[in-house]
Every structure is written in C-alpha cells, then in structure tokens.
Image (cartoon, rainbow, N blue to C red):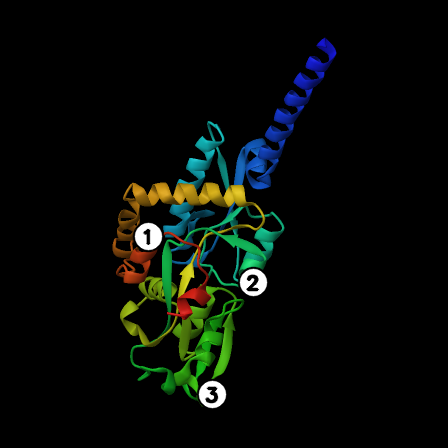
Amino acid sequence: MKSKKLSRSCLVAATLLFGAVTANAASPTMDKIKSSGAVTMGVRESSIPMSYTTGDSRFDGYHVEVCRMILSDIKDKLGMSTLRINYQPVTSQNRVPLVQNGTVDIECGTTTNNSARAKDVGFANTLYVEEVRIAVKANSGINSISQLAGKKVATTTGTTSVQLLRKHEKANGVNFEEVFGKDHADSFLLLESGRADAFVMDGSILAGNIANAKNPKDFKIVGEVLSTEPIAIMVPKNDPEFKAAVNAAIAKIVANGNMPKLWNKWFLAPIPPKNIVVGLELSPATKNAWANLNDKPAEDYAKK
C-alpha cells in the first residue's frame, strides 16, 4: 500500500515537474533572455523618428523607446534585476531573416505587418499606422502620381513602396524609372542630389528625412495616399508566450497613458542629435489603434 502511495506521489511530482519544464520551454526567446541576461533588439539606422542612430552606436526613436519599455516589463516578469540590451542594426532586406534565425529577439523599426511576412515572423499589436506618400523637391512642380510619368522614383531596397505606387489606380499608364537606395538615408540622398525626382516611402520616414535635411523647406510631401499600413514590432514566429508578454507590456503602456506623451516627444518636439522637429500630427488611424489594440495585417486595412 505504501508502495502505491509512493508511486502516485512520484507520478504527481513528475507531472508537476514536466509541466514546469514545458511552461519554461514554451518561450525559447524568454528562456534565452533569462539565461544570458541579455536581449538583442533590431534597430534601423535612418528611420527617423521611429528607429535611428544618434551616433556612437547609440539608437533611439519612437519604436525603440517603446521596445525598451516592453523589455523592462519582461525583465520584471522574469524576475531579473538587470537586462542588457544589445542593439543590432537591420536593413529592409535582412530584418525578417535575422528575426527568423534568432539573431534578433525583437525588431523595433518600421516594418509593415502583412500576410506575406506573417508566414515567417510574428507581429505585436500595432502602435503606429502609416500612410505611404511621395516626397519631391518643393520646386519640382510634382503634386500627384500622374506627374511621375518619365521620372525617376527612388525607393529603399527590400521595401514595398514602389509596388504600392504601381498598383494604385491613378498610376495606370504612368511609366517611371525605379532607382534604389540601400537604406532610407541613401534613398533620400538620391532625391536630394537630383538623381531621383521623387522618393516613395512611409510618411514618417519622409518627414523625418526632410526635417533632417540641410534645407527642409526645399522638399515637400505630395500626392495621393498610396496605402495605409500597420507598422508593428516584429517578434519570432511560433513563440506565443513571448508575443503574449510583449502585448501585455504594450497594453500596460497604453493603459498608463504613455502613448500620447511618446508621440509628442518623437513627432512634435525637438529630437536628438540635431534637435530637429519632424512635425507629424497624430493620425486618427494611429489613435484608433491605441484604443483598439490588435495585430491585424495590412490586408485588413486595405479592405476598408
């Protein structure tokens, strides 16, 4: 009889132990963070004011600060006293593969959440909804898509902006030459130097690069809105516990009333290192995303 009781006790203990191991193993990302005491954040070098370098291998921006707040919450959740953040610059081309292969634990840049990317990575709840627009020189005479016929249009390698331009109904019969920049700063330089007549990209990136230009008044954002897209923080796919922890932290940030403060700080006030002001007002779409947290892909926005 004692033997049976002992066996049952061992079975219960083993079951509880197995459950604990399974729970811990449910999130390889959080296990890695706790065991190493560090996390790798994917950041962009020139996506002002979302994610960019301020010099000397330092990074900042709207999404970068949000991610720091998320990681602070996860640090507390894991019972850690300190957490070292390693910053890994990523590009439009390598950001998804670096999250896929585990080099980057959380990507805090300007990535559109769409169905194609969702096959390879996960996306946290959206805190920024973007409008893809066109930047030109102020004296160019270009004010709409139809005026891009025969022009050179810059975009950043690995982005979808020019594809969106070509698909726009008002682009029918409008033939233009596509030129590529290796990153957003390089694409803007193509416009600034006259090697491109227009630069098609997310409105925040266009506004940030214009504000950072030598003569911001020489440029303007024009034309029809090409697309409305959710820009979200990327996380590894098939790690639901980590995504849930990220989204729980996002919910706290929103509930504590931090989002309007973060918007004002990064989009409406002077930002480092040059104290430029991006001057992008909060859109109704972004405000609605805060009020109704979700991870809907861009395709859902296109249906509206």
Q: Where is residue 145 in the image (x, y as percent from the top left)?
A: 37, 82
Q: Where is residue 94 in the image (x, y as percent from the top left)?
A: 57, 59
Note whether residue 189 is visible: yes
Note whether residue 61 is visible: no
Q: What element carries label 2?
A: loop
What is the quadrant of the N terminus in the image?
Answer: top right
Q: Name the residue under label 3.
A: 175
Is residue 232 shown above or below 8? Answer: below
Q: Position of residue 75 (x, y in %)?
A: 46, 33
Nearer-the-camera pick, 100 or 115: 115
* Nearer to us: label 1 or label 2: 1
Q: Mark 2 points at which residue?
A: 93
Is residue 9 shown above or below 289? Answer: above
Nearer-the-camera pick, 282 or 103: 282
Residue kind at label 2, given as amino acid type:
Gln
Asked whether the residues under the numbered discs 1 and 3 touch, taking CB atoms below 8 Å apart as contact, a structural biologist would say no
Residue with the most extreme front position: 1
Residue kind at label 1, given as amino acid type:
Trp
Q: Of the residues under marks 1 and 3, which one precedes in the sequence?
A: 3
Q: Of the residues under marks 1 and 2, which one precedes in the sequence?
A: 2
Q: Quote the CA–CA distance across marks 1 and 3.
A: 39 Å
* Nearer to us: label 1 or label 3: 1
Q: Quote the CA–CA distance across marks 1 and 2.
A: 28 Å
Nearer-the-camera pick, 56 or 262: 262
How dense is the environment of label 2, judged by Cα within 10 Å: few (below 14), some, or many (20 and up)? some
Number of disc labels: 3
Residue with the most extreme top position: 2
Is residue 31 shown above or below 130? Answer: above
Residue 78, numbered circle: none
Residue 259 vs residue 100: left or right?
Answer: left
How dense is the environment of label 3, judged by Cα within 10 Å: few (below 14), some, or many (20 and up)? some
